[in-house]
Image (tube, helix red, strand yellow):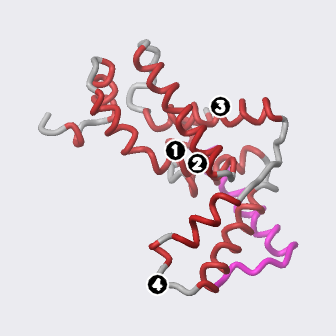
Amino acid sequence: MKTITNATDQQLVELFGSGNMAALEVLINRHRKKVYSYIFMQVRNQALAEDLFQETFIKVITSIKTDRYQDHGKFLSWVIRIAHNLIIDHYRKSKQLNTVSNDDFEGQLFNSRKFSDVTTEEILIRDQIHNDVRSLIDYLPEDQKQVVLLRHYAGMSFKEIAEVTNVSINTALGRMRYALINLRKLINEKNIILTV
């Protein structure tokens, strides 16, 4: 193996299992964006998303170190499944299924360098569009909502979504189709304009 960054997820899991800490760092960095995005879009709170992200990887580390990782070749799907279960556990404990907070996110949005070429008005409009779409997703049935979040916010393929949700690819595709149909209906019903 030339370099650890070119190793497959499975090779990295094996390297970490045998004590190579750099392999864990590569795994986390490789999947950080997808896992964090999925968690954040579910909880809509930056501090909570960061806590759940850390908790997810603590479970990943523990599982690998105790030889309980069995999903060979499906590492990202396995991690997303762990994150999803932790999110469900969090809401069961707090009994606040509809709590949504954007406070932490807004401050960072306006201080971000990547938005420096656009006007404040464009940022506000784009942010409102994203919030409107995200709010509409909450109206979808749970199975459709999950597919949309995994596909568009976690960037997973339909094959990965099928693995995470324990359904066939055709079922995942069907759920996405119905989700899009339902979102179009909601946009029309609520008279929402989704353009800048």
Which residue carries the number 2 mark? 38
Quarter holding residue 13: top left
Left or right: 103, with 12 as reference point: right
> Along the polypeptide, which appears first: circle 4 or circle 3?
3
Verify whether residue 194 appears in magenta.
yes
Residue denoted by label 4: 117
Give the Cα separation between the discs numbered 1 and 4.
28 Å
The residues tagged by marks 3 and 2 sit, at their Cα atoms, a distance apart of: 12 Å
Query: Which mark is in front, 4 or 2?
Result: 4
Measure the C-alpha gap from mark 1 to mark 3: 13 Å
Circles 4 and 3 in contact, beta carbons < 8 Å: no
Q: Amino acid at mark 4?
A: Asp
Instruction: Tell me, for residue 35, which label it has, or none.
Output: 1
Q: Which residues are magenta?
A: 169-196
Residue 120: x %, y % from top left: 60, 84
Farthest residue to the left: give it: 2
Describe the element under mark 4 as helix, strand or loop.
Answer: loop
Crowd around label 2: few <14 · some 14–19 · many ≥20 (10 Å)? many
Closer to the chain start, of discs 3 and 2, is 2
**Please, what is the dominant secondary structure of the magenta stretch?**
helix
Residue pictured at 81% horizontal, 68% vertical: 185
Write the residue at 56% across / 43% down. 161
Rendered position, 75 above or below 105: above
Identify whether 98 is placed above or below 59.
Answer: below
**Residue bearing the label numbered 3:** 85
N-terminal label among 1 and 3: 1
The amino acid type found where label 3 is placed reads Asn
How far, Cα to Cα, is label 4 from label 3? 39 Å
